[in-house]
Image: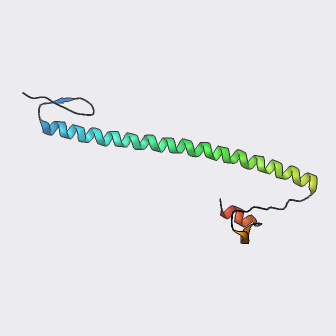
């Protein structure tokens, strides 16, 4: 009698139909695990980037506050390629 093996988990079956069903289930489980892994990796990357952004914002506020303490005021001047909005705080946030 011929033996059929699942190409993913290597279980042996007497019938080709059983092997096909097993491979189908194994493949679905594999894809589900891959999606969960990818989702976890994206979540880790999101957390790391948020932490990096929070640190950058904290540093920015420290620098701005020190500047304001020394000079009394601070004028925002950001340019993101649109000359009509080059000195606008709203333009800065709109481009974030």
Quadrant into which the N terminus falls: top left
Q: Nearer the viewer, residue 15 or 84?
A: 84
Residue at screen point 32% across, 40% down: 29
Residue 9 at x, y percent in the picture = 27, 31
Q: Is residue 74 left or right of residue 79?
A: right
Q: How is the image coloured?
A: rainbow
* Residue at 13% over, 28% down: 3
Image location (x, y in percent) of residue 5: 19, 31
| In the image, residue 30 above or below residue 70 | above
Residue at point 93% right, 55% down? Answer: 71
Asked whether, in this view, residue 1 is left or right of residue 59, the answer is left
Farthest residue toward the left? 1
- What's the residue at 28%, 38% (across, down)? 26
Counting every numbered tag in the picture gives 0
Residue closer to the observer: 60 or 40: 60
Of residues 36 and 63, the one drawn nearer to the viewer in this rendering = 63
Residue 35: % across, % down: 41, 44
Q: Is residue 48 above or below residue 75?
A: above
Q: Which residue is situated farthest in the bottom direction here?
A: 84
Which quadrant of the figure has residue 11? Answer: top left
Q: Is residue 74 left or right of residue 31?
A: right
When asked about the image quadrant of residue 96, the answer is bottom right
Classify residue 33 by image quadrant.
Answer: top left
Q: Depth check: 42 or 85 in front?
A: 85
């Amino acid at each position: 009698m011929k033996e059929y093996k699942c190409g993913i988990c290597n279980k042996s079956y007497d019938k080709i139909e059983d092997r096909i069903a097993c491979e189908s289930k194994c493949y679905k489980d594999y894809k589900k695990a891959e999606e969960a892994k990818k989702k976890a990796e994206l979540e880790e990357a999101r957390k790391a980037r948020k932490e990096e952004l929070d640190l950058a914002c904290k540093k920015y506020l420290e620098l701005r506050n020190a500047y304001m303490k020394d000079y009394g005021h601070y004028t925002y001047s950001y340019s993101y390629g649109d000359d009509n909005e080059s000195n606008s705080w709203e333009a800065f946030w709109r481009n974030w």
